[in-house]
Image (cartoon, coloured by chain):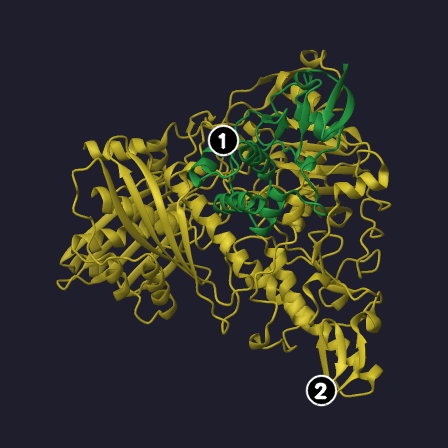
Chain colours: A yellow, B green
Amino acid sequence: MEVKTISRREYLKSTGALIVSFSFSGPVSRAFAQAATPAGTEPDATSLDSWLAVSADGSVTVFTSKVDLGTGVITALAQIVAEELDVAFKQIKMDVGDTAKTIDQFSTVGSRTIERGGPQLRQAAAAARMELLKLASTRLETSVEKLRVSDGIVSVTGSPEKKISYGDLVGGRRFNTKITATGTGWDLKVAPEVRAKDPKEYRIVGTSVPRTDLPPKFTGEFTYSQDVRIPGMLHGRVVRPPVVNSKPRSVDENSIKTISGVVKIVQEGNFLGVVAETEWAAIQAARALKVTWSAPTTKLPANPDELYAYLKNTKSFREQVATDKGNPDGAISQASKKFEATYRWPFQLHGMIGPSCAVADVQGDKATIWTGTQGPFRTRKSVADLLGLPENNIRVIYCEGSGCYGRLSTDDAPEDAALMSRAVGKPVRVQWMREDEHGWEPKGPAQLMTVRAGVDAEGKITAWDFMDRSFPWTESQGNPLLASKQTGLKSGGQGNSNGTGGGGDIYAFENQKIVAAGIPWMHPDPTPLRTSNLRAPGELARCFASESFMDEIASSQGVDPVEFRLKYLSGNKRATEALLAATKKAEWKERASPAATPSASKVTGRGVAMGNRGNTITAAVAEVEVDKSNGRVAVKRITMAHDCGLIVNPDGLKNQIEGNIIQGVSRTLMEEVQFDANGVKNLDWASYPIITFGEIPDVEIVLINRPEMPALGGGEPSIVVVPPAIANAIFDAIGIRLREIPLTPQRILGALKV
Amino acid sequence: MARISLKVNGTPRVVETDPSTPLLYVLRDDLGLNGPKFGCGLSQCGACTVLMDGNTARSCTIPVSAARNRSITTLEGLGSVAHPHWLQKAFIEEQAAQCGYCMNGIILTAKVLLDKNPNPTDAEIKRALDSNLCRCGSHLRVVRAIKRAAREKA
């Protein structure tokens, strides 16, 4: 498989200069595309040619709007197509994320790419295989039933000399075949009536095919969105307000007069940026530009206590009921023992290592955008709305950026670049500086969770009442992004929910209610505490609360936390097996928590947690060491059992799980956006530390493969169990329950002193 | 503006630029070397790392004038997909990245470590890389790749 990128080697060869030369004639020209879709038409989901094309050499190009965010998912999708077509993996070319060439399969979000995008491509490939067999049947003068395919060669069973390749059958020509396609986005059903291969016959799916994107990433030859260069391109930098949004009252152009190479100060409404001939000139100018800002109209809560009080006391605008069974209120009132606890989760950053970056070329009423967006079609819409142009006048071309964990589903940089490009009439590359990214990226929302339970005389949980109070994603699809807001576009609504899963829904209780309440977070101006989906949205917090709470009840009864959980997993075979697999691998010793508290200054503990995100089941055991003298927690080992149905690429999946665990440890122990009434205070990595090499735990992974099931997502589900497993292990070690993330040394020391 | 002579990946180069420009932008924008990446501009994350006279340097905060006549190696100077350096080969074998944006700094830092200490322990590897941030969580694979490189080179 190869992913279509513009390699530096290629452009050096082709131009002899330091500029990428894109060979299409106009911004929305398809001459460059070589797509099977004819020029001048939008790809149509009911045309087989919109999904794939077979070249004369037998290679197969797959067109998909699903993109690789560094997760390796495009390699996995290529495996699925190669499998279904019976061609060698290396014959697959993936042409991803170009709105001129692909069908909108929805953004690459929510661990849904394998689950939803996989079947879409698999069925398109199955339909193509059927067409190819029909053509072969005519050419080889035999029935389709007698044909077999191996590595793209169709031959007649029993007469292997009678054969023809895919390339010879259709190479370079269109299929001109209609297929059925109903629904839109990730609900799009492609050729559902075509029978796909029996998973028992899989040879490519299920193997650890190495990722094709990785070698050039280790040599500097990979072209990231940050590396795109267009002839005549200028450099832009944004000038954001220093505090919670205020408006530029006056801009002193003389303040940057001495910086050579400045092309233009771009102001559109409250949006402000600087365009220059070089990056360094743009950076210096953006820093030096003297702007008088108006007093902000928005005030943020001044500190975390005010924030959580706001979450607690503000009337919700929406309540989503995830589970509603029996009468929890009544059952709790009659219970022999009642439990209640509240848990806090702070705002956190996505924290891309490479800040937002995009190139825009706005020419007249057309525009081309190069960016690392998770949703090329979403970006096309947002740029179209911003520029007041029809969507099909905009072409978005995906180029992979830095890992983004949800941040680039709200891709801001294309808007900044588009405004600046329009203002100067030339292509403009915009990269946010570190303080722009930390300060203005949409944050993972803060959450406040209250859990109540009733336990009967036998120690059985009879009632469970879980309430999550969370901000929505202010930057939801349909709501304008930062530059759009600055130019005056208004939000249509409060924004999408921060999810509902993880509040104890994996367990069966007689009376059970799980509710996610949306707390209003609209401000007249954009704020640095704008919010969006951050990896496994809301679910880390809810799982932290529900799984800590389960532990609290188990501990109060002196029952081993694994044994306690198993009672409520009865009938859930996959969850039971995952829990047992993780605890077996971790050599879990049955006993109640906390461990007998030793007097030593360094104490150890172990904790367990269960999760179920998007029907992928995860179970984790964390082992920690707590230094009571300084409050430091060392996570020594995390053991994870992972069941996402059929596994497409075991090593790719392990890579994802390792990443989830490590990022999860970081978010549990150290990450919290600091703010005051004016804005965000941590604007660099020193003030928002993330995990470093010295703090990495050992990781053990147990993959549970279920070939009889569909393939489900692996990009997020394993992160949700990390915070509660660690919190439970800390409790096991020190006997103190911590209910506020992050579990910093200060918090632990504070708790130890009480 | 000034004319500044540099030696990059073994080749003498002359650039005409504002001498206060951080080396990073000269390498990327004037010389078309995409290995070094902008991450923070504050010497905090390591994405912009290059080798200067054999030691790691953070090109986002070093003015190009300070690199005059120094020998600079970028990730491209190690090897290519067609002819990977043994260290790059080990990273490929271990599939030691996700997005890979931080890998420039990690691989070059590992190169300096292995030049000085051909057979490092896990703890020594982690210590050497402690100022290189990776958000995807590829740390364990990186450690494995460096150990593999040390083993296979020996």
For marks 2 and 1, give the CA distance.
Answer: 61 Å
Q: Position of residue A205 (x, y in %)?
A: 59, 67
Q: Residue at x 46, y 49 (%)?
A: A660
The answer to whether A180 is drawn above or below residue A428 in the figure is below
| Number of on-image labels | 2
Image quadrant assignment for residue A603:
top left
At horizontal 82% and vertical 56% (from top left) the residue drawn is A34
| Vertical order, A510 against A546 (above or below) | below
Q: Quadrant of the N terminus of chain A?
A: bottom right
What number is the disc on residue B38? none
Relative to A215, is B44 on the left or the right?
Answer: left
Chain on which label 2 sits: A
**In which quarter of the view is residue A346 placed?**
top left
Closer to us: B1 or A535: B1
Residue A291 place in picture, x, y as percent: 61, 17
Residue on which the image places disc 2: A145
Judged left or right of residue A99, residue B101 is left
Dot 2 amino acid type: Glu
Question: Crowding near pointer 1: few (<14 within 10 Å), some, many (20+)?
Answer: some
Q: Which residue is mark 1?
A: B131
**Taking B64 as reference, is A293 left or right?**
left
Q: Are marks 2 and 1 in contact (CB under 8 Å)?
A: no
